Image: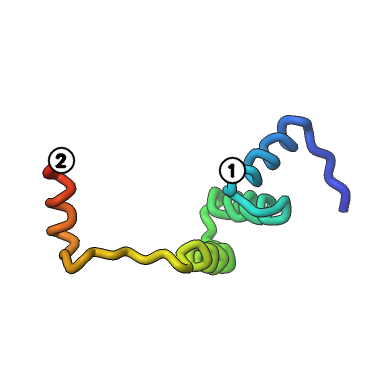
Amino acid sequence: MSINLTPEQQNAIEQAIQSGLVRSVDEFIDSALGARSQRNGGFDKGQARLAGARIRELRKGVRLDLKGMSIRELAHAGHKY
């Protein structure tokens, strides 16, 4: 399939890739199609699974060190400053 894009559309896709919003043109199109189905009132389980997988991938290696503090204590400590 061949798709013709306006320069503005091409620029939007390139900016989305450069900013890290998507990793490829294919992912941009998948996201756009998913947004379209949501706008039409549908919930796409496949898109939800892909989003979950993407979040899990982004979280790899991310750790939160509370240094023995509870979340409440940590939040309170942040308000001291």
Give the left or right position of residue 12, taking residue 7 as reference.
left
Q: Residues within 10 Å of mark 1 (few under 14, many from 20)?
A: few
Residue 54 location, x and y as percent? 54, 63
The structure residue drawn at horizontal position 28% and vertical position 65%, both measured from the top left corner, is: 65
Q: Which residue is mark 2?
A: 81
Determine contact: label 2, label 1, CB under 8 Å: no
Q: Nearer the viewer, residue 48 or 44?
A: 48
Residue 31 location, x and y as percent? 62, 53
The structure residue drawn at horizontal position 21% and vertical position 65%, both measured from the top left corner, is: 67
The structure residue drawn at horizontal position 60% and vertical position 55%, both measured from the top left corner, is: 34
> Which quadrant of the view contains residue 8?
top right
> Which quadrant of the view contains residue 49?
bottom right
Please, what is the three-letter code of the amino acid marked with disc 2? Tyr
Give the left or right position of residue 6, taking residue 42 as reference.
right
From what the image shows, is residue 3 above or below residue 70?
above
Please, what is the three-letter code of the amino acid marked with disc 1? Ser
N-terminal of the pair, mark 2 or mark 1, is 1
The structure residue drawn at horizontal position 59% and vertical position 48%, both measured from the top left corner, is: 20
Residue 17 location, x and y as percent? 65, 46
Q: Nearer the viewer, residue 13 or 1?
A: 13
From what the image shows, is residue 25 above or below residue 43?
above
User: Residue 19 got which mark?
Assistant: 1
